[in-house]
């Protein structure tokens, strides 16, 4: 609390919750410490950036007076979140509650003017209670299972199955297709050659069988002829 002989001012600094494109406000409480009426006036080094309501007034003896200071919405974040703005609160003893004038705060008036300087402080915007509760109540994902041989084996099996399926689903390359077609044609040609060779072997077998049968008949006739000649010779 900033205090003078006439007024106690709270807070000692004007703290504004800083947020882009928002208009924060700060309540300034002025307490009259005397048994007299005290006139006050609030000024700032940057009047285009702030609005003070009310900017002047009279405080009854041993009473309090609230002044609301509103900052225009900032469009950019200042360096290091620091402000060079200052506020000046002037106070002077007056005779009644309606005698506050600009002339009272001039040096030519001869009045004893008390002055208190307040600095401006930017503070981060506090989180709402609902946001804090949401963060506290947000479920956390379960921890990953401890690796084991079984898990590794299952993973390897699943990976192998997946790779096999991917290989089956992947269409063959043109070179592979041509190779398969060529092997199929070669197989057909080999089967035809085997069939022709089998037919040739069958023909050769038939010819040999017929030749053997012909030789056997000639031999039988020759033997029969010799027997006939022998019998006729000895019986003549």
Image (cartoon, helix red, strand yellow):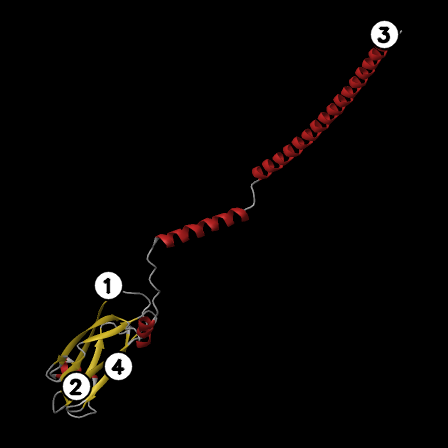
Which residue is the extreme one toward the right? Answer: 236
Image quarter where the C terminus lies is top right
Label 3 with label 2: CB-CB less than 8 Å = no
At 60% from the left and 36% from the top, the residue drawn is 178
Q: Nearer the viewer, residue 231 or 96?
A: 231
Which label belongs to residue 80? 1
**Identity of the residue drawn at 78% across and 17% down:** 215
C-alpha separation, residue under disc 2 versus residue under disc 1: 33 Å
User: Residue 95: where, in percent of width, then height?
Assistant: 15, 92
Please state which of the two labelled residues, at mark 2 or mark 1, is closer to the viewer: 1
* Mark 1 element type: helix
Say which residue label 3 marks.
Answer: 234
- Which numbered dot is residue 13? none
Using the numbered discs, state the Cα–Cα distance from disc 4 to disc 2 in whole angstroms: 14 Å
Residue identifier under label 2: 31
Secondary structure, mark 4, is strand
Q: CA distance from mark 3 to mark 1?
A: 152 Å
In front of the other: label 3 or label 2? 3
Residue 227: percent from left, percent from top: 83, 12
In the depicted view, which residue is nearer to us: 166 or 189? Answer: 189
- Labels 3, 1: front one: 3
Q: Are discs 4 and 2 less than 8 Å apart at CB?
A: no
For the residue carrying disc 2, how many other residues have a C-alpha within 10 Å: few (<14), some (14-19), or many (20+)? many
Which-is-in-front pick, marks 4 and 1? 1
**Relative to 151, is 222 on the left or the right?**
right
| Cβ atoms at labels 2 and 1 below 8 Å apart | no
In this view, the residue in front, 5 or 138, is 138
Tag of residue 68: 4
């Amino acid at each position: 609390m900033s205090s003078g002989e006439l007024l106690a001012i709270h807070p000692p600094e004007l703290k504004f919750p800083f947020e882009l494109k928002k208009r924060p406000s700060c309540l300034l409480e002025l307490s009259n410490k005397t048994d007299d009426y005290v006139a006050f006036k609030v000024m700032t080094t940057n009047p285009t950036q702030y609005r003070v309501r009310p900017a002047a007034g009279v405080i009854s003896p041993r009473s309090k007076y609230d002044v609301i200071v509103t900052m225009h919405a900032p469009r950019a974040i200042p360096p290091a979140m620091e402000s060079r703005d200052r506020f000046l609160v002037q106070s002077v003893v007056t005779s009644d509650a309606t005698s506050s004038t600009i002339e009272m705060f001039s040096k030519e008036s001869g009045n004893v003017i008390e002055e208190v300087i307040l600095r401006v402080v930017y503070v981060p915007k506090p989180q709402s209670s609902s946001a804090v509760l949401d963060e506290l109540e947000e479920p956390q994902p379960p921890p990953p299972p401890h690796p084991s041989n079984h898990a590794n084996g299952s993973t390897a099996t699943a990976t192998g199955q997946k790779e096999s399926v991917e290989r089956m689903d992947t269409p063959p390359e043109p070179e592979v297709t041509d190779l398969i077609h060529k092997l199929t044609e070669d197989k057909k040609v080999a089967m035809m050659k085997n069939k022709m060779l089998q037919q040739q072997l069958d023909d050769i077998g038939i010819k040999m069988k017929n030749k053997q049968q012909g030789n056997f008949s000639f031999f039988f006739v020759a033997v029969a002829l010799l027997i006939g000649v022998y019998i006729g010779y000895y019986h003549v």
